[in-house]
Amino acid sequence: MKNSVSYRVSRANVSGLCVLIAGLFLCLPFRSHSQQSVSDSTDYSNANIVLPAISSSPETSLLFGGVAIRQFKPGESQDDTRSSMLMFSAIYTLKNQVSIGLQPSVYLPGESWLVEGMYSFTFFPDSFWGIGRNTLEEDEMKVISRQLFLQQGVLKKVYNHLFMGPQFRWTSTYDIRFEDMEGDIIANPSVTGAEGYRGLGMGVMLRLDDRNRSTTPTSGGLYQISLLHNPSFISSGATYTSYLADGRRYIDVSGNGRSVLGFHGVMQSRTGSPPFMDMAALGGESIMRGYYAGRYRDNHAAQFQTEFRQHVIGRFGFTLFAAAGQVWHSFDDMNLDRTLWSGGGGLRFNLNKKDPINIRMDMAFGRNISGFYFTLGEAF
């Protein structure tokens, strides 16, 4: 599941970069602490963080809003329970674009259960280039829609750091229309979901999670496999199934958490007839940074990235990262010659020294493309 809020500037220009950097230092967070309601063996304190958001991009014009974060340990949580987080975001732009979201990730005492979800409403014009690896830049069109999205997983700890449980996802995409780059309405392309889509996916997730922290880990790993089946009798469209394999590993190079090497691989597959908005996609603020999220999409996608994170002084640090990935229609069509790459670096500012969570600014470059990201939370 996605674990950060992103304000993205694709094809960033100098003025947009200056606005973002100024916003970072002008909009310092308000933070308050409250002691745990019960005594435990740590000095952990619950934290409330309110972060104003100011940004600008060609897609959004002026963007503003806010993010509120609650970091806490519920009930009688002890050392064996990692901190939980609730994150609420509300964003509005001068182009009347709206995004409202709530993202809970709650470990119950002893990590006996993990309750994790994402609930959002968005009205954000997006870009669509078609299906497949061979789409061209001149194929770009605008897709405008409203979307309600609810995703929930309830995972039970079955052995040590191993969790397993059901998950569901409900999506409603409506009021959809397509425009050319001049803003004129055009005929909807012949792809599944182009007339709108409503569906309920149900499935199961298996997760092995021995990270030392859930927000900004410095050691351990996260490995998960999930399946979501979307039957046509409760979805407006053909039946399809989504598969996801996600693996992350963190190595504390320095031994004290100051220098960390991270590895992240994602494999997505879709069988049946998925709507185009739910196809396996490449790019975004979490992996293959530099590529517009969904710039390439098809039935299958594989992506891999590595990142070096270095704490410098006080609350500040930097990162260097590189990634590679591709999409393909069928496994017979997979070709390593079509692999795309990206790389870049960024700065970090820690909002909470006792339970680190970072603001990140990343500049990424790909094949004839670039992107600047002003984001809350690490990429992975």
Image: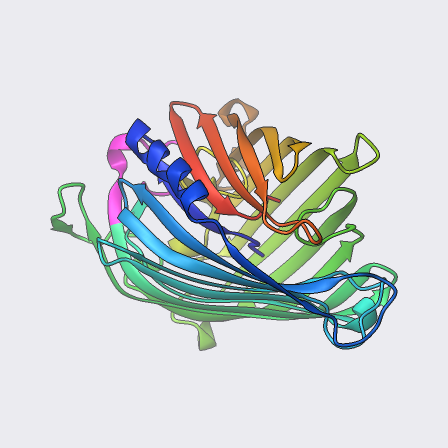
Q: Is residue 232 above or below residue 327?
A: below
For the stretch drawn in magenta, what is the main secondary structure?
Answer: loop
Q: Is residue 76 magenta?
A: no
Q: Residue at x 38, y 31 (%)?
A: 134
Where is residue 38 drawn, in percent x and y? 80, 76
On the image, the x and y values in percent for residue 203 come to 62, 68
Q: In this rendering, would 314 be left or right of 286?
A: right
Q: Quadrant of the C terminus?
A: top right
Q: How is the image coloured?
A: rainbow
Residue 154 sits in quarter = bottom right
Q: Nearer the viewer, residue 299 or 333?
A: 299
Answer above or below: position of 315 versus 343.
below
Horizontal side of residue 155 vs 342, given as left or right: right
Q: Which segment did they paint magenta?
A: 129-142
Q: Is residue 273 left or right of 96 when viewed as pictured? A: right
> How far across and how far down the image is residue 82, in percent?
76, 60
Tell me the residue at 24%/47% (across/down): 142
Count of numbered labels shown in the rendering? 0
Residue nearest the viewer, comparing 99 with 268: 99
- Give percent across and percent down for residue 163: 77, 64
> What residue is shown at x 58% (from left), y 70% (from top)?
152
- 141 within the magenta span: yes
Residue 334 seen in render: no
Q: Quadrant of the N terminus?
A: bottom right
Query: Relative to 361, is 165 on the left or the right?
Result: right
| Image point (75%, 39%), residue name | 250
Front residue of this view, candidates 137 and 322: 322
Is residue 355 visible in the rendered image? The answer is yes
